[in-house]
């Protein structure tokens, strides 16, 4: 039986790598539901993910559901893992504070399944004391992180904050679901 994964996609410049992650998850035999933040839609169309996975892409908290079920709760209950990749400082901060103002944060709050987070952001944002405090808080609550790597950032500088390699993310997913 296929394991169900919710892939949360946020508005990092590394959003294009979420397509590679989705394809790799599908190759591994996982069933994947994509949930995009509204900000992610500013960088990439939901149609791209829909085309790759052949499933509906979940977007708005108040979109009309296809069947009568509360989407964020049903997605949270069906998921055996929630993977947020790429994860911005914004989504990490909202999760750490219990803020539920979009579909993805509501799914995260409603789940009892493991949550795996792959940060991708500017080095200064990643190393910011508030972001690091939020990461520490989430780790203390049982959330797992796939550490970013050092590389060329969107700002043109080299530093820590690049999304982990797709292979490392898939390895972490498999390890978490053992």
Image: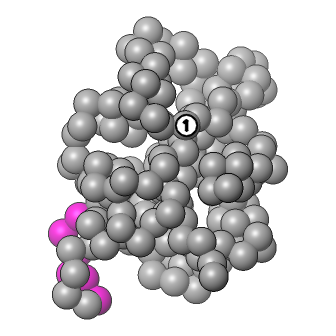
Q: Is residue 146 left or right of residue 82?
A: right
Q: Hey, which quadrant is residue 153 in on the image? A: top right
Label 1 element class = strand
Residue 63 is covered by the magenta coloring = yes
**Quadrant assignment for the C terminus:** bottom right
Q: Is residue 57 left or right of residue 61?
A: right
Question: Looking at the picture, does residue 170 appear above or below residue 121?
Answer: below
- Farthest residue in the right direction? 167
Residue 43 seen anywhere in this rendered image of the structure:
no
Question: Residue at point 26% right, 30% down?
Answer: 97
Dominant secondary-structure state across the stretch colored magenta = loop
Nearest to the observer: residue 87 or residue 142: 142
Question: Residue at point 59% right, 40% down?
Answer: 118
Nearest to the observer: residue 133 or residue 158: 133
Instruction: Give the percent coordinates (x, y) of residue 28.
Output: 76, 70
Nearest to the observer: residue 108 or residue 3: 3
Mark 1 neighbour density, 10 Å: few (under 14) some (14–19) many (20 or more): some
Instruction: Give the percent coordinates (x, y) of residue 73.
Output: 26, 66
Nearest to the observer: residue 131 or residue 70: 70
Magenta residues (range): 61-66
- Farthest residue in the top direction? 129
Instruction: Give the percent coordinates (x, y) of residue 130.
Output: 38, 14
Question: Residue at point 45% right, 81% down?
Answer: 56
Residue 111 seen anywhere in this rendered image of the structure:
yes
Q: Which residue is mark 1?
A: 144
Question: Looking at the picture, does residue 136 appear above or below residue 29?
Answer: above
Q: Hey, which quadrant is residue 58 in on the image? A: bottom left
Instruction: Give the percent coordinates (x, y) of residue 64.
Output: 21, 81
Question: Residue at point 24% right, 37% down?
Answer: 98
């Amino acid at each position: 039986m296929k394991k169900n994964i919710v892939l949360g996609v946020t508005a990092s410049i590394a959003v294009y790598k979420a397509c590679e992650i989705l394809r790799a998850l599908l190759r591994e035999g996982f069933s994947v539901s994509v949930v995009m933040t509204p900000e992610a839609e500013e960088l990439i169309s939901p149609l791209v993910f829909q085309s790759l996975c052949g499933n509906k892409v979940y977007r708005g908290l108040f979109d009309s559901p296809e069947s009568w079920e509360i989407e964020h709760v049903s997605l949270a209950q069906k998921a055996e893992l929630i993977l947020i990749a790429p994860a911005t400082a914004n989504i990490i901060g909202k999760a750490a504070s219990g803020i539920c103002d979009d579909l993805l944060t509501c799914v995260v709050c409603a789940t009892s399944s493991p949550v795996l987070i792959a940060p991708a952001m500017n080095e200064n944002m990643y190393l910011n004391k508030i972001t690091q405090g939020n990461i520490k808080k989430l780790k203390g609550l049982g959330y797992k992180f796939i550490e970013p790597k050092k590389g060329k950032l969107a700002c043109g500088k080299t530093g820590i904050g690049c999304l982990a390699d797709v292979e490392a993310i898939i390895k972490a997913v498999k390890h978490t679901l053992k």
